[in-house]
């Protein structure tokens, strides 16, 4: 299930994030890659001070975790701190699958990967996020401030950037519901429940609401 979330960051928030990134140092992204991904990885990652990271995360992550679409589709139990990555001309990330377990002293299972786009599409050529799905490949290049959620188990890549600079924030979620098909069903039910909320006294709403709540109870791991 691919979920796009528009307008996580407004223009003022986006300008503040971009200003911090443009004044910060970046290092070789291979340093944070797993053994297999390291072969395919050719990008740079933010080497920021604590103050810089706090400034970025107070905007980016605070806005993300308040999004109803994020909460209803991911059903998050844990979320990582993001990696801020930069791709300039010639950089790419070959096809790979994210490591199943991440983190240092606080470990988490990667069920869902999140890319938040921080550069405007017209500011760079190439750099599409290519995700393999059961229905073919999806090439995703969203406006700055938008995000996409996708299963960490899916093979994906970043196409070569041929001009300009691609900035993104990347994070991973351990969901309360491990099974992606179960998450898809729950997300569909949550959307139906939201559409029927104005009829909260109706029998149909109550049936949908009861089914959603009890399926979460059945499938959630906490």
Image (cartoon, rainbow, N blue to C red):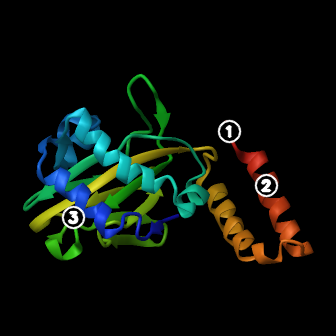
Within-10-Å neighbours for mark 3: few <14, some 14–19, many 20+: some
Sequence-earlier tag: 1 or 2: 2
Q: Residue furthest top?
A: 105
What residue is disc 2 on?
A: 213
Q: 115 above or below 109? A: below
Within-10-Å neighbours for mark 2: few <14, some 14–19, many 20+: few
Q: Are marks 3 and 2 in contact (CB under 8 Å)?
A: no
Q: 220 above or below 92? A: above
Number of marks drawn: 3
Q: Give the image location of residue 149, x and y in percent.
A: 45, 59
Query: Secondary structure under badge 1?
Result: loop
Q: Residue furthest right?
A: 203
Which of the two residues, 164 or 35, is positioned nearer the viewer here? 164
Residue depicted at 85% across the width and 60% down the height:
210
Query: Secondary structure under badge 2?
Result: helix
Residue depicted at 52% across the width and 60% down the height:
67
What residue is disc 3 on?
A: 159
Left or right of 153? Residue 92 is: left
Q: Give the image location of residue 129, x and y in percent.
A: 30, 64
Label annotation for residue 205: none
Whether residue 206 appears in this view of the structure is yes
Q: Real-space Cα distance between discs 1 and 3?
A: 36 Å
What residue is disc 1 on?
A: 221
Whether residue 97 appears in this view of the structure is no
- State which mark lies toward you, 1 or 3: 1
Q: 20 above or below 197? A: above
Sequence-earlier tag: 1 or 3: 3
């Amino acid at each position: 299930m691919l979920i796009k979330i528009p307008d996580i960051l407004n223009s003022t928030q986006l300008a503040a994030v971009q200003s911090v990134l443009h004044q910060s140092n970046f290092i070789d992204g291979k340093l944070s890659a797993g053994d297999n991904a390291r072969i395919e990885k050719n990008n740079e990652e933010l080497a920021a001070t604590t103050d810089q990271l706090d400034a970025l995360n107070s905007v980016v992550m605070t806005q993300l975790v308040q999004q109803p679409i994020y909460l209803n589709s991911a059903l998050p139990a844990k979320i990582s701190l993001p990696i801020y990555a930069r791709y300039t001309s010639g950089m790419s990330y070959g096809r790979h699958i994210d490591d199943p377990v991440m983190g240092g002293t606080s470990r988490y299972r990667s069920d869902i990967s999140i890319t938040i786009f921080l550069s405007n599409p017209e500011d760079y050529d190439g750099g599409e996020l290519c995700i393999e799905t059961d229905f073919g490949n999806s090439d995703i290049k969203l406006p700055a401030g938008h995000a996409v959620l996708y299963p960490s188990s899916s093979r994906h890549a970043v196409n070569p950037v041929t001009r300009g600079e691609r900035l993104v924030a990347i994070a991973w979620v351990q969901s309360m519901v491990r099974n992606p098909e179960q998450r898809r069903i729950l997300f569909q039910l949550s959307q139906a429940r939201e559409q029927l909320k104005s009829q909260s006294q109706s029998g149909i709403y109550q049936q949908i609401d009861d089914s959603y709540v009890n399926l979460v109870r059945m499938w959630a791991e906490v």
